[in-house]
Image (cartoon, rainbow, N blue to C red):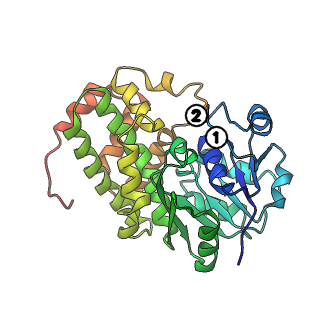
Amino acid sequence: MTIEKLAIVGGGAWGTALAQVAATGGRETLLWAFEDDVVAAVNKIHENPIYLKGLKLSAAIRATSNFSDLKQADAWIVVTPAQHMRAVLGRSPCPKMPLVLCSKGIEESSGKLLHEVAREVCPTSPVAVLSGPTFAHEVAAGLPTAVTLACEDRDLGEALRSRINLPAFRTYCTDDVAGAEVGGAVKNVLAIACGVAEGRGLGQNARAALIARGFAEMTRFGLSMGGRRETLAGLSGLGDLVLTCSSTSSRNFSLGKAIGEGKSAAELMKDRRTVAEGAHTAPVLHRIAMDRNIDMPLVAAVVELLSGKVSVDELLKTMLSRPPGDEED
């Protein structure tokens, strides 16, 4: 099995960075973007000034807003916001070529993981998931990065890895699609909590504790969804959690930090051109956890904070008054 021409579906920062990876060596790459100004800039000046300002893109990348152009590709790299993926994939009859899902989240309306959504909308398309600790601007600049490529079809996984693997973009394969997706979804919610701690000036010790206890919540949830412990402890789980909870380059961490500094969650999420997926994932993640009787106190706290039911100080008081339990719980 050989995969050569890739179409990137989504012209945001991450989609543009993956187009840069796919076009390495002058390989023809198609980038579909919703915004006409993004398409025009990529084609005319080889830049995406809206989402990756100042970074020169490969001349092998051609942008389009015409969905029918995507039929020319051997595989689609789907990088739309999680809550819009169903609608974007449903814009035209779905292809039979593979779909590599790179968005991180859980569909709010259905509570489904994104690979389940893709299989509903495009039942004839094989589905893989690409996830891991990846800031788009670093990937686009060619800085060293390692990711998880999850695909149940081993031959397809190897073909995809062969196409996108680079010395500075290391791709590790697994067949645990659910585990890879859970890590990417849950870490966004936990990053908001770590951002709040940063904005409130609670210190590095508090952040480390939040990451560790958050990972315990991620693991409990992931196992209940059919994921494997080793996947959750790998790049797409723990690796992505540490990165996203440690830098303002993370939109979710930045959102939490601003809330911790006293800004309103509702105002912060209004009119944002870039999406903090954790804000959308938190309520549905909490709902699934309640239905499955999974203890996820940090996730519950983020939901209360984003909904405006409690203030940061009230939330911290509640969290700090929780009785300590056993480490393994």
Image coords of residue 225 (percent x, y):
44, 65
**Residue visible at 49% across and 24% down?**
268
Contact between marks 2 and 1 (CB within 8 A): the answer is yes
Front-most of residues 23 and 1: 23
Front-most of residues 60 and 179: 60
Residue designated by label 1: 12
Q: CA distance from mark 2 to mark 1?
A: 8 Å
**Residue visible at 58% across and 57% down?**
114
Which residue type carries mark 2?
Answer: Thr
Image coords of residue 233 (percent x, y):
35, 63
Image coords of residue 307 (percent x, y):
43, 31
N-terminal-most mark, 2 or 1: 1
Residue designated by label 2: 274
Q: Quadrant of residue 116?
A: bottom right
Q: In the rendered view of the protein, which quadrant contains the C terminus?
A: bottom left
**Residue visible at 46% across and 43% down?**
283
Q: Does residue 116 appear to the left or right of 37 in the view shown?
A: left
Image coords of residue 85 (percent x, y):
66, 50
